[in-house]
């Protein structure tokens, strides 16, 4: 692995897309420009985002997820057997319309404006999920690269819609078998390319323990949940450990948050990681990437994983944390974690969904600079 400084500074993943790229994304979706034309525009955006990260002092860079329309939905373009459906279309399809309408009531955007990657056939890779993205990034940076990917539990739950999926799979668990295969193929490709850090995103884990059975999530993944959260968490542990088994020569992390689609913190989940601890400590990952810059995350916990990716700035606030604020967050963590176990990062990405960023590029840059300045002070 690449030699890193103490308290390495990383991104969680996404960076706000420029207007030109958002326009190109819309035109591509409408069939008005070619895939190649979109890729040329995305290339320029990625180069710009790498420059921002260099300016901010980021040690492990991402491509800002510039080619993706969202942190999960982009897989529909890469996988056989997966189709985008708007939540409004899904409402017409699902049998339990009352449960689905509960989900829609929690959204602060129209149902027709959000789409979900839904399993409609046997799932396999048409093309790699991220390897092509990595090849381009590596041409334009000498720094270590992080690749965020949707986690196996998120993919399985979000893609499983019984009415659409049951012709191909008898159950959600059957679908999970092919999700594991897809992600293991992806890790193999990324390791071959020399990727430093693979991060799996599993935000729906918090929905299991913070809602006490009530449906409060921005993803239709809630439809596929059992009534017993413990069963779901056991399934999540099982899936992740099968995905990562045998991959020892790459840093694998797990990112968990409480929702990152709105600046209105009252619409997002709240609660400590404590109810998840017994499950997290059985997951065979090197690093947990956790949000801690919001009071909604509760007190800092010591976990048994070798590393913690400590969230030290809130990506959803327009107020930029001071260097002293970030230093205080790091100092609190150093009471539980040795410095060699700590990485520092934002709580989440700055634009989980391409057309719904939670902040501007200027504020994102200033927040990342504050993280780097604090880390440098400790070094």
Image: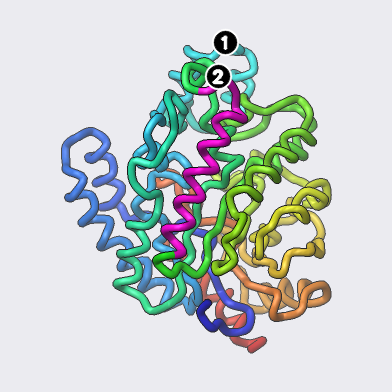
Q: Write down the region rendered in magenta.
A: 169-191
Q: Position of residue 39 (x, y in %)?
A: 24, 53
Precedes in sequence: disc 2 or disc 1: 1
| Vertical side of 3 occupied by 40: above or below | above
Q: Are marks 2 and 1 in contact (CB under 8 Å)?
A: yes
Q: Position of residue 64 (x, y in %)?
A: 42, 60
| Vertical side of 330 occupied by 264: above or below | above
Residue picked out by circle 1? 95
Q: Residue at x 40, y 29 (%)?
A: 81
User: In front here: 275 or 192?
Assistant: 192
Question: How far apart are the two marked residues, 2 and 1, measured between alpha carbons?
Answer: 9 Å
Q: Secondary structure at mark 2?
A: helix
Q: Residue at x 60, y 27 (%)?
A: 172
Q: Residues within 10 Å of mark 2 (few under 14, many from 20)?
A: many
User: In front here: 336 or 175?
Assistant: 175
| Vertical side of 22 occupied by 3: above or below | below
Q: Main secondary structure of the magenta part?
A: helix
Q: Which mark is residue 162?
A: 2
Q: Residue at x 18, y 50 (%)?
A: 36
Q: Please state, as top left, top right, bottom left or bottom right, where the C terminus lies in the image.
A: bottom right
Instruction: Answer yes or no: is residue 102 visible.
Output: yes
């Amino acid at each position: 692995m690449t030699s890193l400084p103490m308290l390495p500074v990383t991104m969680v993943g996404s960076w706000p897309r420029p207007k030109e790229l958002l326009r190109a994304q819309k035109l591509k979706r409408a069939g008005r420009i070619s895939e190649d034309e979109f890729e040329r525009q995305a290339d320029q955006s990625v180069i710009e985002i790498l420059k921002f990260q260099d300016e901010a002092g980021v040690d492990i860079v991402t491509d800002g997820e510039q080619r993706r329309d969202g942190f999960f939905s982009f897989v529909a373009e890469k996988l056989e057997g997966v189709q985008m459906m708007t939540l409004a279309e899904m409402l017409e399809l699902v049998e339990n319309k009352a449960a689905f309408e509960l989900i829609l009531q929690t959204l602060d955007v129209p149902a027709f404006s959000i789409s979900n990657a839904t399993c409609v056939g046997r799932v396999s890779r048409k093309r790699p999920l991220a390897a092509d993205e990595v090849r381009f990034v590596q041409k334009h940076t000498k720094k270590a690269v992080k690749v965020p990917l949707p986690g196996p539990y998120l993919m399985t739950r979000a893609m499983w819609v019984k009415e659409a999926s049951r012709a191909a799979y008898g159950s959600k668990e059957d679908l999970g078998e092919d999700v594991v295969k897809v992600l293991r193929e992806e890790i193999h490709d990324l390791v071959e390319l020399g990727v430093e850090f693979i991060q799996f995103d599993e935000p729906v884990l918090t929905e299991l323990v913070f809602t006490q059975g009530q449906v409060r999530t921005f993803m239709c993944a809630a439809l596929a949940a059992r009534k017993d959260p413990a069963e779901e968490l056991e399934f999540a542990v099982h899936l992740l450990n099968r995905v990562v088994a045998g991959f020892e020569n790459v840093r694998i992390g797990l990112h968990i948050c409480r929702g990152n689609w709105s600046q209105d913190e009252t619409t997002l989940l709240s609660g400590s990681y404590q109810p998840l601890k017994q499950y997290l400590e059985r997951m065979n990952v090197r690093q947990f990437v956790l949000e801690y810059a919001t009071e909604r995350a509760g007190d800092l916990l010591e976990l048994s994983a070798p590393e913690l990716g400590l969230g030290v700035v809130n990506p959803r606030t327009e107020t930029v944390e001071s260097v002293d604020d970030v230093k205080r967050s790091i100092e609190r963590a150093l009471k539980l974690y040795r410095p060699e176990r700590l990485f520092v990062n934002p709580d989440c990405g700055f634009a989980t969904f391409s057309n719904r960023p939670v902040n501007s590029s200027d504020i994102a840059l200033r927040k990342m600079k504050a993280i780097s300045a604090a880390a440098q002070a400790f070094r």
